[in-house]
Image (cartoon, rainbow, N blue to C red):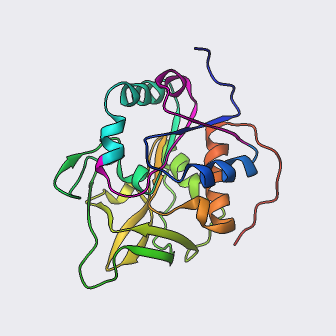
Amino acid sequence: MSRPETQHAVILDAGVGNLGNLSRALARLGAEPVITSDPAIVAAARCLVLPGVGAFSPPRERMRGALEEALREALEGGAWLLGVCVGFQLLFEASEEFGETDGLGLLPGRVTRLPHGVPLPHIGWNRLHGFAASSSSPSSQASSSLLEGVPERSYVYFVHSFAPDGVPANRVLARATHGRAFPAVVGRGRVLGTQFHPEKSGEIGLRILGNFLRMTGLEMARREMAHG
């Protein structure tokens, strides 16, 4: 199969995801989203988005085999990847949800339940805080570009009961707090993710998605981005 055109943002269909809203948000930013579980398209992609809703295990099982191999091939070839919500959690080494399940291991850390004593699932708007300081590392600078123009304490929209834990501080780009402070945005090189739903987070979410598209080198339609 031929390589997708550079304007395509490939949304991986792992069987559970907010595919329609995410696709519409990317299209609004000038990308041409393609929703697929075709390993050939995934392997050839430059810009990949891995969404997810619900529990960790079903999309993890769907990713095993040819789709996971295609994802790794794309990354080895220079692709960028953004995980969203459960798709973000899949990027880590493991999750304790309904028993230990291995993750993709693309980001360091594991996914654990938010503390008892706070409402779960954590649904609604919450603030980002603890933004990472700029680093001299080109890799860290690239990752930090995901939050370019996003003010600290911006509100974004969450739906989850589990969140990453044990993530090295130099990989955490921003945190949020619900029962405990948890990594809400993490990045390592060309692999990034958000625990919240940017496609449901208004202009702040669109800015984050727009930043990601620019990082991948996609050509986008010009639009004025709100500064929050």
What residue occupies the far bottom of the structure in this picture? 117
The quadrant in which residue 181 appears is bottom left
Q: Nearer the viewer, residue 53 or 5?
A: 53
What residue occupies the far left of the structure in this picture? 99
* Magenta stretch: includes residue 53: yes
Which residue does the image show at 75% across and 66% down from the upper left? 226
Residue 131 in the image, given as x and y percentages of width and height = 49, 67
What residue occupies the far top of the structure in this picture? 1
Above or below, 36 relative to 102: above
Above or below, 111 relative to 4: below
Residue 107 visible in this rendered orientation of the protein: no
Query: Viewed as shown, does residue 154 lie left or right of 101?
Result: right
Above or below, 189 relative to 56: above
Residue 29 in the image, given as x and y percentages of width and height = 74, 50
Residue 152 in the image, given as x and y percentages of width and height = 56, 74
* Magenta stretch: includes residue 116: no
Residue 228 in the image, given as x and y percentages of width and height = 69, 72
Query: In the picture, which quadrant includes the N terminus?
Result: top right
Q: Nearer the viewer, residue 24 or 45?
A: 24
Q: How many marks?
A: 0
Query: Viewed as shown, does residue 203 lie left or right of 105?
Result: right
Which residue does the image show at 28% across and 72% down from the upper left? 114
Residue 80 visible in this rendered orientation of the protein: yes
Which residue does the image show at 48% across and 74% down from the upper left? 129
Residue segment shown in magenta: 31-57
